[in-house]
Amino acid sequence: MPLPLPAPARKIAQRARLAVTTEHAAFWRSRPVQVDQVLYESFAGNGVGCNPEAIFRHLLDHPDYSHLKHVWAISDPASIARFEAEFARHPRVSHVRRGSRAYVAALATSGYLVNNATFPPSFGKRPGQTYLNTWHGTPLKHMGFDMPDGAFQSANTLRNLLSADYLLAANPFMAETMYEDAYRLRNVYQGRIIEEGYPRIDRQQLTDDQLRTVRHELEGAGLRVGARRIVLFAPTWRGSSFSDPDQDVDALAAQVERLQEALGDDVVVLLKTHQIVHAQAARRPGLAGVLVPNAIPANVMLGAADALVTDYSSIFFDYLATGRPIAFLTPDADEYDRTRGTYLPLDELPGPVGSDPAAVGAALSELLGGGEHPRYREWADRFVPFDDGGAAARVVDIVFGRHEAGYRVRPVRRDGRRRLMLYLGGMRPNGITSSVLNLLGALDPQRYDVTAVMPYFRSPVARVNQQRVPAHVRQIFRIGGMNGSKFVQLRRRRNDWRGTPLGPRAAEWHLRLWEDEWVRVLGSARFDWAADFSGYSPFWANLVLHAPATTHAIWLHNEMASDRNRTVDGRARMRRSLGLVFALYRHYDQLVSVSPSLTAVNRDELAGYAPSVRFRTVRNLPDVERAAAGIRLPLSSVLEADEPRPRWLSDLEAGGTRWFISVGRLSPEKNHARLVRAFAAVHRDHPDTRLLIVGGGPLADALQDLIAAERVQDAAFLAGVRGNPYPLLAAADCFVLSSDYEGQPMVLLEAALSGLPIVSTGFASVGDALPPGSIHVVARDDAALAAGMTAFLEGDVPPSRLDAEEYTATVMDEFARIADAR
């Protein structure tokens, strides 16, 4: 066995494979779309089944579609063998292994794409392709944004649904509850929803010959069915099964055994696992005589079963169409409801429900004797109203025949709200993140349909901030990388390197590259207003500009010209990137600064990049509720779990001293060095004073060295990043800001909400950062700042003030003026 590669070598190898795959994909994306080819995929290639198989078989047998070529993406070896045994000699049918180069080629060039789940993150639908997503069942359990952490967990699913031209719904409940509500497609999705039943349910209507074939296949797989009636046990998978699938499989084996005991020898209980856990179940010797082969389609097995036992699986909705008995085994109902939840109460299901396999088996035995559950007809009428055996024909006629008239095909609902999209940035713990989260929380969900776009975060800190996005906001994540050949990417980067980035429609190749990326990330989503709230990334500034047919806005959080020239360790790290952003300003409709005076500064200093009429103002908002709650928290709440109690916290709790506090990133424009020097001068005359600097950044070590050089290490402290600074603000006596330039610092709003006196240097936008008289403003030098801090000690700096309700109303009016602009 070869030795494993060391970690660095593995990364290089992975990147090399990715580069080859990406370039291969780019090549095929440059090839013409084959309008007569259909690519099918079911459960990420785990089999040939579900709705895609039913559609495939209908197309294959229909003379009107004899021109079509059919390609299946399969990864399961048993399914490949079964597929080849049936179709190896068919001239129009083939398969590719999911994830292979042939798969990439088929995905990029097939005219029709049919999937019951999701294509991978690299997929972006091309012009000329028609994508039908059938999904794989009416949901009983919560889906999409309704799940815990559902926005993040559903990122690729939402991306696929937004990319589809057609979404198939088995019934109106599924269309509304799952697609429009759980996945938030309402208002923004531009495709069509088909409500014509489920093609896979057609396959449950087995002839006598087909039933004999299924039983023969079961016997051939070692399942001793004989002439006995079949009870199919088909539970769903639990999210925890990925981390501990064996425990789940052991529980399934025990449940099958107890069901079999309760139902007796004239019935055989067979287990049909979810595709995700089948591989684990197949390795369990105790299940060898009861586990249905993965290659037998689930709906074919439903057609062969005399009764069904399930838990929360959507498979029971399909089975309603047979009119045969259903029972529900839910031993973990309370835990499942707490961690995942269901849309319909379990005690109202159309069959006996219980936690004990023996009791459930006994109740099912009575139904097998000829009884019917009282709610069965009601549920069948509601959830399988269109499943008459002809669903596949109707869906094919709509999608492949292009005949929508007379069928149940519709767009998603629109409710008249204005559709806003904001790119939030990297969600680091900084003022921009606080500002955008506060804005999202203040926007009226009855007036605005809001979408937040973000990277697919790996950082735990960013994930914490992402989880603070209000629940009513749709979240879309950019997962995967940009498509396009290496030549095209190098061409783009060459222009960027020269500092001459192309505008949105300056060249056809450039336009196509960015429009493809927009479609890959956001599919067909459309918005009335799109904003880059971060304002610092050339990539995102470019992508937002390619939001189709809308108003485009970009935020300017600072004196941007000064920010561009800011140096850290002698390097102007943002000179090139902000230069690229500046070059795109002329294509934006609105350039939004965060205070009136900052707007004036940016309008003057950036006059060469955009017309003056496009510069607007929307001030930052504080989180009033979070501030009020944070002020009441104990000081110890600012500590991380198991963090040793720092000296500064004990001193702050002890009292007897007067504390200056500053909160902000430790970066050059904040000029914390000036603050340390000013404090050292004050401390010499007032030994009872202390300084706490909250924040992290590249200058932390240099500041610590300066504190030691000024000999105030027993009085001045760096507290690092603190997720909730309000308890510290409440415990301090005076807030100090020493910046050379700013936008409208969130920390000033937070200090005002805490009722602190504020001393600040006179950067350009300080005058309207808060209501007049709220800030004691001094010159930007050490002596002036020290004098201002001394003025506080002498009682000459009153507490700041902020009427939060009035201020919020003013800011929301500012926002409405730009967001509602036509």
Image (cartoon, rainbow, N blue to C red):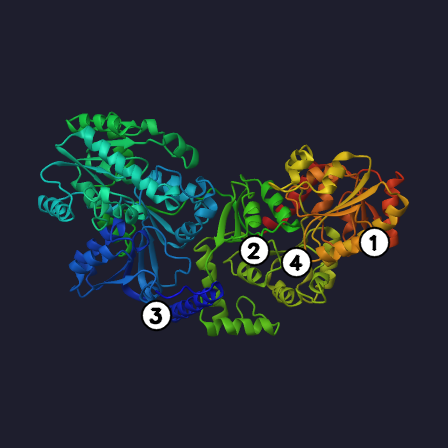
* Mark 3: secondary structure: loop
Amino acid type of the residue tagged 3 in the rendering: Pro
**Label at residue 614:** 4
Amino acid type of the residue that numbered disc 1 sits on in the rendered structure: Glu
User: What type is the residue that disc 4 sits on?
Assistant: Arg
728 vs 547: above or below: above
Position of residue 639 measured from the top left corner of the image (x, y, whole percent): 65, 41
Side of 534 relative to 266 (left or right): right
Cα distance in 3D space between marks 3 and 1: 70 Å
Q: Nearer the viewer, residue 74 or 36?
A: 74
Name the residue tied to disc 3: 32
Circle nearer the N terminus (1, 2): 2
**Dot 3 crowding, Cα within 10 Å, few <14, some 14–19, many 20+:** few
Image quadrant in which the N terminus is located: bottom left
Residue 580 at x, y = what percent?
A: 62, 67
Query: In the image shown, does 314 or 291 lie closer to the viewer?
Result: 291
Looking at marks 3 and 2 on the same chain, the residue that comes earlier in the sequence is marked by 3
Alpha carbons under labels 1 and 2: distance apart: 52 Å
Tell me which label, 4 or 3, sits earlier in the chain. 3
The CA span between labels 3 and 2 is 33 Å
Question: Badge 2 is on which residue?
Answer: 551
Q: CA distance from mark 1 to mark 4?
A: 47 Å
In-front residue for pair 363/397: 363
Dot 1 corresponds to which residue? 710
Tags 3 and 1 touching, CB below 8 Å: no
Residue at image coords 52%, 61%: 546
The kind of residue on which mark 2 rests is Thr
